[in-house]
Image: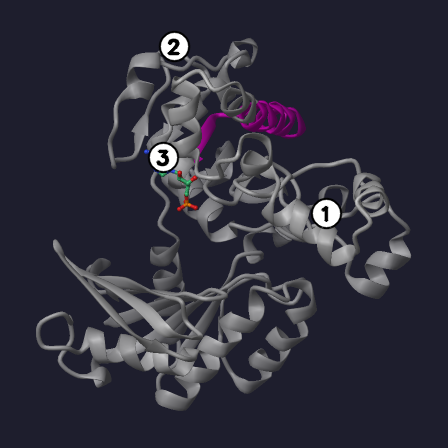
């Protein structure tokens, strides 16, 4: 069974084609600069990589290019588009409407449209991709897998802000959390590595990438997470500030003589690691840190300190923790970030093996000492596989 996973961003489309009878990846790629006359098409099949420049004026053109590529005799992995049994879409915001993955129907599309005000930058491209497929392949089923769905199990104590409840009821102002598919996936792999049923585990998962979030997962369910109503809350990120005194935006507005848009740009695009040291890519920041750059060291320390605060506070709300998991670009690759986020956590029985932490690998691994009560696991995330699995489950019932 061949399933295509699609992730439509504001100017990009990522795709991965799976053979779900064996859960193997057949080919994948990414279209960049969608919406322009000079789009970039990157495609990968096994070790072979292809790059093309061509006009990609809209999502529909982009999706036609993807379908042509995956059926191409040389670059592709299927002979005919009829082999494609379904499309699985990553959808960023599912609000309170979606607590699980869904078969996309006209009714679901209109419910997804209602979620747009909560993610005005992310959900419209997701919907554009869905509508393009509806037009190009009207008989191929499509499923939506929501980034927020996994966190719908959070109790009110976690998801409400301490503002008048009326505002929650009137405007849906609450915490939703993101990266749900990733937190779900790595927690399941972690339970297997711990040799315990997921229902009997307490796990803190740290998804550290360009956007970063931490999740407290008790008995397999998300009970708290660091991102909030939008992906701005929580950790220090590449360009986002994370947790902040809510009065600061008003002060910036007044002193910098700017408006809501100006503050939004500062907090979302000019803050985080970039705002502190001038680099938003942690590789550049770490390189500068090695050269003794004080601001890079400060940015790294702020990043790790915030992670540490979340890990310890989540252990507290769950009454303990069996494993801390690191995933995504920084979590999987940066031994500095892992080392300095866990430093000082020995008091709760967590001991990192510094040698194991330094070893580079693409495999899931345990980097704690044998006597560490809390295991430290590095687990490569695989959100696309979860999307393909959910899509397979849904269409198998049709
Ligand atoms: P993601 O959003 O998961 O793709 O992660 C992107 C982040 O991962 C960027 O900040 C990268 O700099 C970071 N990253 C990727 N590889 C490494 C590495 N080898 N060491 C440190 N950071 C890395």
Q: Secondary structure at mark 3?
A: helix
- Estimate how packed mark 1 is, as few (under 14), some (14 to 19) or many (20 or more) residues with alpha carbons within 10 Å: many
Residue 310 drawn in magenta: yes
Residue at 50% across / 71% down in the picture?
126
The quadrant in which residue 357 appears is: top left
Q: Nearer the viewer, residue 66 or 361?
A: 66
- Work out whether residue 195 can be spotted: no
Tell whether label 1 touches label 3 (CB within 8 Å).
no
Q: Which residues are magenta?
A: 302-326
The answer to which of marks 3 and 1 sits earlier in the sequence is: 1
Tell whether label 2 touches label 1 (CB within 8 Å).
no
The quadrant in which residue 51 appears is: bottom left
Residue assigned mark 2: 371
Q: Secondary structure at mark 1?
A: helix
In this rendering, the label closer to the viewer, 1 or 2: 1
Q: Quadrant of ligand 1?
A: top left
Q: Position of residue 144 (x, y in %)?
A: 48, 70
Q: Is mark 3 within 8 Å of ligand 1?
A: yes
The answer to which of marks 1 and 2 sits earlier in the sequence is: 1
Q: Nearer the viewer, residue 11 or 79?
A: 11
Against 91, residue 174 (above or below) is above
- Estimate how packed mark 3 is, as few (under 14), some (14 to 19) or many (20 or more) residues with alpha carbons within 10 Å: many
Q: Position of residue 46 (x, y in %)?
A: 13, 56
Residue assigned mark 3: 332
Residue at 13% across / 70% down in the picture?
75
Q: Is mark 2 within 8 Å of ligand 1?
A: no
Residue 232 drawn in magenta: no
Q: Position of residue 370 (x, y in %)?
A: 34, 13
How far apart are the two marked residues, 2 and 3, measured between alpha carbons?
23 Å
Q: Secondary structure at mark 2?
A: loop
Residue assigned mark 1: 159
How far apart are the two marked residues, 1 and 2, measured between alpha carbons?
35 Å
């Amino acid at each position: 069974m061949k399933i295509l996973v699609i992730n439509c961003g504001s100017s990009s489309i990522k795709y991965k084609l799976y053979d779900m009878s064996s859960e193997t990846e057949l080919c994948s790629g990414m279209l960049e600069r969608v919406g322009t006359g000079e789009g970039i098409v990157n495609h990968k099949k096994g070790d072979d990589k292809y790059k093309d420049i061509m006009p990609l004026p809209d999502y529909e053109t982009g999706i036609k290019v993807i379908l042509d590529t995956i059926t191409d005799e040389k670059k592709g992995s299927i002979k005919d588009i009829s082999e494609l049994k379904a499309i699985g879409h990553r959808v960023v915001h599912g609000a309170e409407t979606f607590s699980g993955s869904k078969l996309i129907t006209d009714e679901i599309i209109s419910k997804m449209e209602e979620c747009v005000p909560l993610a005005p930058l992310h959900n419209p491209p997701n919907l554009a991709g869905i509508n393009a497929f509806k037009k190009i392949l009207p008989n191929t089923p499509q499923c939506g897998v929501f980034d927020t769905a996994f966190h719908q199990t959070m109790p009110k104590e976690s998801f409400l802000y301490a503002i008048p409840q009326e505002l929650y009821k009137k405007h849906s102002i609450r915490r939703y959390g993101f990266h749900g598919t990733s937190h779900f996936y790595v927690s399941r792999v972690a339970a297997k590595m711990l040799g315990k049923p997921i229902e009997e585990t307490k796990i803190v998962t740290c998804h550290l990438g360009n956007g970063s979030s931490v999740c407290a997962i008790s008995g397999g369910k998300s009970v708290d997470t660091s991102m909030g109503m939008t992906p701005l809350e929580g950790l220090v990120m590449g360009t986002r500030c994370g947790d902040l005194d809510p009065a600061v935006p008003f002060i910036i507005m007044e002193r910098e003589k700017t408006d809501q848009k100006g503050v939004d740009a500062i907090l979302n695009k000019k803050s985080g690691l970039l705002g502190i040291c001038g680099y938003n890519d942690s590789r550049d920041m770490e390189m500068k840190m090695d050269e003794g750059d004080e601001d890079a060291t400060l940015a790294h320390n702020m990043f790790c300190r915030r992670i540490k605060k979340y890990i310890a506070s989540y252990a507290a709300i769950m009454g303990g923790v069996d494993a801390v998991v690191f995933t995504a670009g920084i979590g999987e690759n940066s031994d500095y970030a892992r080392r300095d986020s866990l430093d000082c956590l020995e008091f709760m029985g967590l001991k990192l093996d510094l040698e194991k932490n330094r070893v580079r690998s693409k495999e899931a691994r345990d980097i704690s000492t044998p006597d560490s009560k809390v295991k430290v696991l590095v687990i490569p995330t695989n959100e696309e596989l979860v999307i393909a699995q959910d899509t397979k489950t849904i269409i198998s019932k049709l």
